[in-house]
Image (cartoon, rainbow, N blue to C red):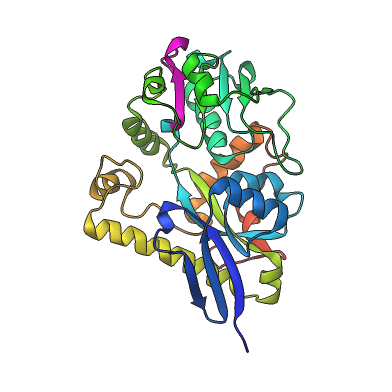
Amino acid sequence: MGSIQLVMACDAPELALLKEGTARLGELEIEVQHVHPRERHKKMAQSLAFDICEYSLVDYLNSFDRGLSFTAVPVFPHRVFRHRDIWVSSASGVTEPKQLNGARIGIQSWVNTAGGWQRGILQQDYGVDLKSIEWVRESPEEGEGKQSPNWARITQKPRDRVLEQMLASGDIAAMMLPRPPELHPEEMQRIGRLFPNYVADEQGYYARTRLFPIMHVMVIKNALLSSHPGSGKMVSHWVQAALDAFVERQRSTNGKSILWKELRWSEQQSHLGPYAWPAGVEANRKELEALIAYALQQGIINRRVSPGELFQFNGKPLVESA
């Protein structure tokens, strides 16, 4: 019997040991491609471009009840604290979260994982009223069902403007993107982080909540799961093994923290514990339930799904830990 040719798209730093090229898992021959998140998520959602894909967790939640042609396994290759990615204009005078009430804030789109966490944290921890804000969107919502809630005041940025430049000029008071600002040095002097001591704020957030925000999940085409019933377990174990190996390498060499670049791995570990990237539903229930609650509050989903539902194919968990 010949091998099954598959393509997997990913780019999480935590999966650095999965080099571009071909890997073999029994009869599965998997070509690993490193693809930028926005391109990867769009291609997977619109054309099923990959057999296995690192995918936006909020996009998965948003589309879950409408039916998908792929199913997630409870492996979470990319996690990031998001306090660091909330930026404010110096001209706005905003120095603390509650001053964002009534402001104009730039966002990539309403339905994205980083924004879901950021809005949830601002609302829950700092009393920011999401309904009071004018959300200036960078990109239209793409895909079926990706609509913002009626209560959200969302406008589209002008075509000839860039959110970062609107922030530097003071046209928007704040900006929340899942990436650092792309500005010239002189423009960077006109903006700053809402949480200038974000390392301490993120560490304090984790100590208080024990939430390590999940950004991405691994998904597998339903056609593959049907034709090769063991593929879900095989792929999830392989991806988790790569993640485990990366963490062990960083720990044993005391490499740089993947989260806080100015720290070493041992310092990161003192805050997060020895292993902060577990697989399985139970080990990640708090994060999953928190993001589901935020998605419900923000109109991204219409009902409170249970974490276990998300990782079932034909009514059964794809792996035992689910």
**Residue 186 colored magenta?**
no
**Residue at the image position 63 percent from the left and 65 percent from the top:** 51
Residue 322 visible in the displayed image: no
Q: Is residue 181 left or right of residue 318?
A: left
**Residue at the image position 32 percent from the left and 27 percent from the top:** 197
Q: Which residues are magenta?
A: 85-97
Q: Is residue 39 left or right of residue 90?
A: right
Q: Is residue 156 above or below residue 234?
A: above
Q: Return the x and y of residue 305 as percentages of the image width and height.
A: 67, 47
Q: Is residue 117 above or below residue 132?
A: below
- Splitting the image into 4 quarters, where does residue 155 fall? top right
Q: Return the x and y of residue 315 as percentages of the image width and height.
A: 71, 64
**Residue at the image position 37 percent from the left and 34 percent from the top:** 202
**Residue 94 colored magenta?**
yes
Pick the quarter of the image with the C terminus.
bottom right
Pick the quarter of the image with the N terminus.
bottom right
Q: Of residues 143 and 277, which is closer to you in this image?
A: 143
